[in-house]
């Protein structure tokens, strides 16, 4: 077993030992990417990354924490999404560890948080006996607000002209970089694509803003 | 021809997307402090970008779930002997239609979800509907539900109250209760199309595609063009089930 955690101990305050890569055939993507490289990648790459390491994580998590397979999968999905989010925000460029180590550490943290919530919920179950479930909903205001914002933006996005909508979908919803956006839309270069994205985004912001003014 | 970008909004976007250098950022932040209109632009842009980010994550999550289907389908065939594999291929061929990953009614209900934004609340007003809307918009569904029930006790056939009582019940995963309320939002009410759309989503959650179709067909010509379009899109997808 090899310790590959150098540089990533900050994630949970402790070093994490991930199992060696299993020997199943790999997808045609290099998974030795650094975290910096993850910033340039789109959803296909993240999907391949997930497929490459999911089974190893699930096996490892089930052994370490006696969780169900679905719980381990959910945690690993969450880890890939966190990597995507942080890469898009440019927050992982300074980290010096492999993508795999990062994903295992984030997945582990998510799993431990989930387990703490489940245990607390189990302990509360007896006290909460008789209270309807909807009154015990744990959806935070943040989550509800996030969902409502996403729905609002989804609705306003549908009102844009098709080419405006497409440029925003390619960049924000499919994670393509500007070169790929330019290619997909048949534009001259990334600068033209970027300008087009700026225009489209401004129109979307104006639509979102007009909705807010109507409601509040 | 494209119009010129709004320079002010362009700076807001550049700020949020980390495209300004340190000096420009500091200058921008100072400007925001003294300019309420610019602050409002910044809030709207931040909200839009956070919505786009959430939609991107939602789409990635679907891709990962789809990868699960592919991975789990692939691992089962690894150790088959050839004649067993041949038989399996035959079976798979015959039942391919069923094996191709398809949307389930529940997945479509989630994908086509419609979040009711609520009614406008006037500053300083204190009517019962405003109190309901305030609780609803703050996500306090329990309080909104209690207030709605109290108002419905006084005015049981009120279409607005019944519609929002249905929405609150549906959001609390009480589709049975929601349907009762939505059925009391009669044709002619401004909330009728929305009620039918929500009722269709409830039917999909319960796996009742026929009922969902019946509800959606009443929405396809709704005055709200966006809701009507959404209903038509969902009906098309239901044809692929």
Image: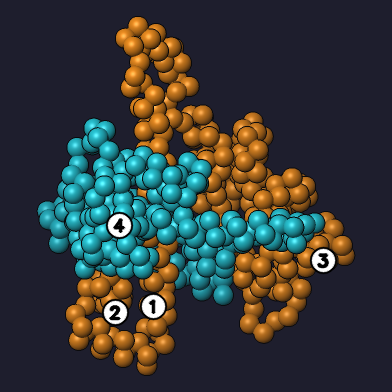
Real-space Cα separation, disc 2 to disc 4, in angstroms? 38 Å
Front-most of residues A88 and A129 = A129
Question: Vertically, is A106 above or below B73?
Answer: below
Report which residue position mark 4 lands on: A102
Q: Is residue B132 visible?
A: yes
In the figure, residue A7 lies in which quadrant?
Answer: bottom left
Report which residue position mark 1 lands on: B41
Chain drawn in cyan: A
Q: Is residue A138 left or right of residue B13?
A: right
Chain drawn in orange: B
Report which residue position mark 2 lands on: B8
Front-most of residues A151 and A74 = A74
Name the subunit of mark 1: B
Front-most of residues B126 and B228 = B126
Image location of residue B227, percent across then percent down? 55, 50
What is the number of callouts on the image? 4
Q: Residue furthest bottom?
A: B34
Report which residue position mark 3 lands on: B151
């Amino acid at each position: 077993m090899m310790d590959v955690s150098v540089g990533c101990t900050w994630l949970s305050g402790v070093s994490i030992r991930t199992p060696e890569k299993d020997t199943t055939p790999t997808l045609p993507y290099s998974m030795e990417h650094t975290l910096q490289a993850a910033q340039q990648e789109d959803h296909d790459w993240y999907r391949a990354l997930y497929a490459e390491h999911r089974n190893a994580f699930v096996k490892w998590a089930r052994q370490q924490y006696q969780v169900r397979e679905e719980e381990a999968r959910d945690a690993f999905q969450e880890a890939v999404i966190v990597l995507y989010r942080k890469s898009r925000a440019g927050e992982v460029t300074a980290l010096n560890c492999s993508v795999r180590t990062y994903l295992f550490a984030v997945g582990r943290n998510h799993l431990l948080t989930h387990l703490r919530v489940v245990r607390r919920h189990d302990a509360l179950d007896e006290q909460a006996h008789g209270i309807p479930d909807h009154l015990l909903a744990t959806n935070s205001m943040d989550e509800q607000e996030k969902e409502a914002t996403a729905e609002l933006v989804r609705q306003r996005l549908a009102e844009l002209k098709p080419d405006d909508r497409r440029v925003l979908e390619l960049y924000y919803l499919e994670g393509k970089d500007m070169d790929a956006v330019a290619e997909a839309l048949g534009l001259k270069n990334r600068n033209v694509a970027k300008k087009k994205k700026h225009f489209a985004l401004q129109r979307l912001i104006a639509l979102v803003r007009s909705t807010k003014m109507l409601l509040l | 021809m494209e119009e010129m970008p709004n320079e002010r909004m362009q700076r807001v976007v550049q700020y949020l997307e980390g495209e300004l250098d340190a000096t420009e950022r500091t200058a921008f932040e100072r400007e925001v402090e003294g300019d309420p209109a610019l602050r409002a632009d910044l809030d709207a842009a931040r909200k839009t970008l956070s919505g786009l980010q959430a939609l991107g994550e939602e789409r990635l999550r679907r891709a990962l779930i789809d990868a699960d289907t592919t991975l789990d389908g692939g691992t089962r065939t690894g150790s088959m002997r050839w004649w067993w594999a041949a038989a399996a291929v035959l079976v798979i061929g015959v039942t391919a239609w069923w094996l191709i990953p398809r949307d389930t009614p529940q997945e479509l209900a989630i994908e086509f979800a419609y979040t009711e934004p609520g009614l406008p609340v006037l500053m300083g007003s204190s009517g019962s509907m405003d109190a309901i809307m305030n609780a609803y918009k703050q996500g306090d569904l329990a309080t909104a539900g209690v207030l709605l029930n109290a108002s419905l006790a006084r005015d049981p056939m009120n279409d607005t109250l019944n519609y929002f009582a249905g929405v609150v019940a549906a959001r609390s995963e009480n589709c049975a209760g929601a349907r009762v309320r939505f059925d009391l939002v009669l044709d002619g009410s401004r909330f009728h199309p929305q009620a039918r759309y929500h009722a269709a989503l409830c039917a999909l959650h319960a796996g009742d595609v026929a009922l969902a179709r019946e509800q959606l067909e009443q929405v396809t010509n709704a005055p709200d063009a966006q809701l009507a379009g959404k209903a038509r899109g969902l009906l098309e997808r239901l044809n692929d089930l």
